[in-house]
Amino acid sequence: MSRGRSPADNGEKRRKFDNTSTSTPNSAAAAAAAAAAAAAAADDDDSKDNEDIVVDDNNDDSGPLNGDGGSASAASPKNSANGGAGSNGSEFSARAGGKQPNPGRSQSASAGAASGSASRSAKLPIDLSPGFLPGVPPPPPLGMPNPFPRSLPQVPLDPAALMRSHMTGKPAYSFLITESNGMQPVPFPPDALVGPGVPRHARQLCCLPHGEVVCAVTISNSGKQVFTGGKGCVKVWDISASASAAAASPPPPSPSPSSTTSGGGGGGGGSVAGGGRPSLLHSLDCLQRDNYIRSIRLLPDGRTLIVGGEAATLTIWDLPSGDVVDTSASSTSASPSVKAELASSAPACYALAISPDSKLCFSCCSDGNIAVWDIQKQALVRQFQGHTDGASCIDITPDGSRLWTGGLDNTVRCWDLRESRQLQQHDFSSQIFSLGYCPTGDWLAVGMESSCVEVLNVNKPEKYQLHLHDSCVLSLKFASCGKWFVSTGKDNLLNAWRTPYGASIFQSKENSSVLSCDISTDDKYIVTGSGDKKATLYEVMYAN
């Protein structure tokens, strides 16, 4: 896990890794040799400080690598439990004097209250309003108090960054957190990037020119429509032409696993691959015009849309006929309409979730509460209280029995929906910006302000820490098959990971911060929303 550090701490860390001599030479020759050594060391240090975090594009047939020197096969001697992925673990121990960085911990709910209070006293929360999200221009005054004061966050300690700056070659990026809070590079199994349900890469199909920063996206169950949320408006797009054209066109040559592709796509709309162009069906005015929409959820029948954001109300929209929309001028049923507005006591809603039976809606409130709404009765039925700062993200288990929430109080909490009580609390040293629960297993993925992703088993002490983002992890979503998930961040990256150990499947780099993402229920499409005022649709490519 990461912790805050000061510039002085950074200097101290660099001195620990500095192997140049500080003694005074006794002759001209010795002085010249010392000067040459110092210059070489400085050049080497600069080159290492400028290294980019990249995934290995040169995987051989034996399987994936977790850093240079790491073996791709679990049967390789280098992949022993003690050595980790090749020489990365031993080299870090040698350079750091054998000390492993403390990755963090999970504690009971009683211990969490004390640590949360200490964390808040040491560091003010980051404002999650889109005006202060990375890559998002500040909005005009909203006419209501800002729920979180703007503050400059401390820069947390990133153990992987230390490894990147002071190790030769490409570093490991996936680590197993041991019971003693040590970090071991993960030896990936030979089938980490192959097999049914595991994608090879993703190709960009089209861009959806929303016109404002896209803070929320969702795909309909049929995969025919995409909904994008920006400032005061939700736009509904028909992507069936793009999907059909992509299916008819031959797939591009498959890059090697863990490759990085550019997902820029420019600022305009239209097709990037496949030839089909998306069409705008509807533009829905929501909340107030200058308020950003933070979450949109579509019920499985495709007829009900729930919208939340920087306002004290949630809006329920009645869509005409689900995915079958008649846009002809003679049609009177083609226009969506507001079905209800739900008044909340909190000034903003940061995230929404829908129960599997579509009866309940859960909203993460800026005051830290989790509001539970009866969709049919359009009424508040209960609230879960526990987060001591804004609740920022949410997901629900497939059976609808448990709810997982993350907050700006550095905690992740699990709620029993049948008994209406908190079951678990996991404490972190960083604010929680995103999370997702695996649909097929007991894995919870958590995206943090500190740039790392943690994947923890909710029923036993098994946890992985993943380092391929260079900044805040702003959104996260599991595929329906549960075999992979994606995360997006301020670093403009879309990362796809293997569940649970985090082998990198592919990356796509966009032109701006990627604020939101969703995966279609059939795992064929990914949509992202970004700070350059557009959404991007990707087709997920699998091996034949």
Image (tube, rainbow, N blue to C red):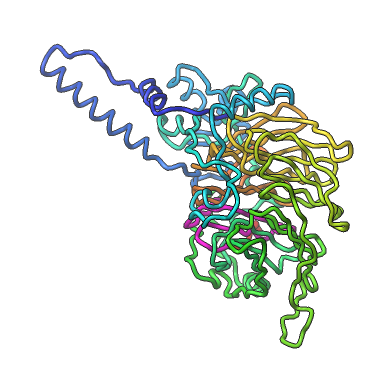
Residue 273 within the magenta-colored segment of the rendering: no
Q: Where's the N terminus, which quadrant?
A: top right
Q: Residue 255: x, y in percent? A: 53, 55
Residue at image position (50%, 42%) is 471
Q: Going 70% across and 35% down the picture, which residue do you hit?
A: 387
Q: In the picture shown, does residue 499 fall above or below 307?
A: above
Most foreground residue, 261 or 130 = 130
Q: Which residue lies furthest to the bottom in this view?
A: 330
User: In the shown orientation, is residue 259 left or right of residue 241?
Assistant: left
430 w.r.t. 225: above or below: above
Residue visible at 25% across and 30% down?
40
Give coordinates of residue 296: x percent, y percent: 70, 58
Q: Can residue 356 be seen in this view?
A: no
Relative height, residue 383 to residue 118 (above, below): below
Q: Does the rendering let one see residue 117?
A: yes
44 in relation to 381, above or below: above
Q: Specify the quadrant of the image occupied by residue 79.
A: top right
* Stretch in magenta: 507-536
**Picture coordinates of residue 380 (x, y %)?**
83, 49
